[in-house]
Amino acid sequence: MSKTRAVRISEAQIQRYMGDDAVSQLRDTRHGNLRFRYGAHGSGSWYLVLHRNSKTQWKKIGNYPAVKTASVMKHFPELLTQYSLVPHSTVVLPEWESVGELLDWYVKRVLCNRFMSSKRKASVKSVVKVHLMPKLGSLLIDELDHAVLDTQLIWPLQQDYELSTVRLILAVLKKAFKQARTLKLIALNPISEIQFSDFTDAKIIPKSCALQANSVAQLAEQLGACDEMERTFVLMMLLHGTRIGETRLAKWSHIDMENNTWFIPKENTKTKVDHVLPLTYVALTLLADFDADSRAGFIFKSGAVAGLSEKQANDVVQRVSDREWRAHDLRKFARTAWMDLDIDYLVAEMLLNHVLNKMDKTYIHTHATHLMRDALVKYHDWLMTQGLGQQLKKEIKGWV
């Protein structure tokens, strides 16, 4: 006896035969090419059945219950046409109707990505919750186009936020749709060709550094007014241009006093690549003079054992700077100073642990450590001439 039932497929009919061992699939009486095949645990699959050259081809077009019956009926005629025109094309039915459903899926996927930093996960989640969901969540996926994005998202956002922030928000939306289309969870990506420049001719001007070359004396006064741990923490970032996360997670075991290096393991870096920085006499003396409770574990501790959290590290910088500059300004300051001191561009990129292309790596690899050390010595000598050493309440030996 045949296990196929010819019915007008609907949610009610699917549920009617769910769990019936005598029925394995449904054939739609409206669209003779459409089949629904039952799976395990309330699941199923949608198929388009084609007959060509005396052969029968089954094309899977979606999973149930991710792809609802209403979506199948809505898109089936155009899907059938697509297969008729291009027999070997790969077309799937969308698993979601609304932008909100797609964004929900994307956030869940991001939060489960163990290769993405916690900071990036929080950023994506916030962008979706605060901006994308309220403005686009209720729209149908196939409603998105330039005009809708302009009126519903881009133009309202640019009234309240910097263009760099608006661009970041659009980038999250584009990434979500690209990922869904790559995995064939949506039939088409309606925003694949959309670029931020389509909406405005205004150029995004990089935020200027809050610390200038003539700010060193003032910075020294700010450092002299804080405690030793805070001063040493900020100085390590200033001296090496390291990121706040790389610095707060530094351990004494990463410091090699014999070979004069600071090892930053890849799990602590943004680029996920191990980074080794030369330590000059200035940096070595700073660390040697640091009156730490213990020379084990984290260099910058919160309590007896734990290192500074992300919030605690940012709070330190805010206290030292009196909210006049951020940790990233220290990194910008170092990069600008290196340029002013005629330090080779590739050497500066190496110090910042930026990703280099293969040609650059080959060019600089042989003498990388030597060149990086010379660059830091030159930079630290320059900092001395700007009065940083003399201004500190706790004098660092060798700076005067």
Image: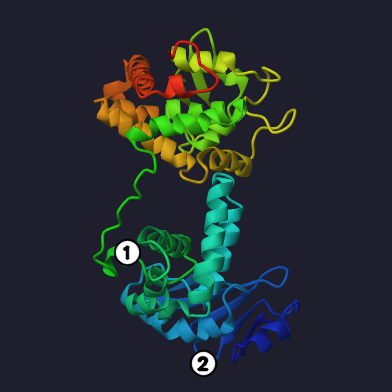
- Determine whether the residue tagged by mark 2 lies in a helix, strand or loop: loop
> Quick check: 119 left or right of 191?
right
Nearer the observer, 343 or 43: 343
Residue 185 is situated, as x and y percent measured from the top left of the image, at 50, 67
Residue 106 is situated, as x and y percent measured from the top left of the image, at 54, 62
Residue 101 is situated, as x and y percent measured from the top left of the image, at 56, 72
Q: How many marks?
A: 2
Q: Which residue is mark 1?
A: 196
Nearer the observer, 132 or 298: 298
Q: Residue at x 53, y 65 (%)?
A: 128
Report crowding for label 1: few under 14, some 14 to 19, many 20 or more residues within 10 A (C-alpha). some
Nearer the observer, 353 or 9: 353
Q: Nearer the viewer, mark 1 or mark 2?
A: 1
| Residue 141 vertical placement versus 314 (above, below) | below
Q: Find residue 67 and report its image quarter.
A: bottom right
| Residue 341 vertical placement versus 214 (above, below) | above
The disc placed on residue 67 is none
- Determine whether the residue tagged by mark 1 lies in a helix, strand or loop: helix
Mark with earlier residue (1, 2): 2
Q: Residue at x 30, y 57 (%)?
A: 204
Q: Amino acid at mark 2?
A: Arg
> Quick check: 146 left or right of 271?
left
Residue 86 is situated, as x and y percent measured from the top left of the image, at 32, 72
Q: Amino acid at mark 1?
A: Phe
Q: Find residue 168 and report its image quarter.
A: bottom left
> Quick check: 44 left or right of 336?
right
The N terminus, quarter of image: bottom right
Q: Which residue is mark 2?
A: 30
> Quick check: 350 left or right of 57?
left
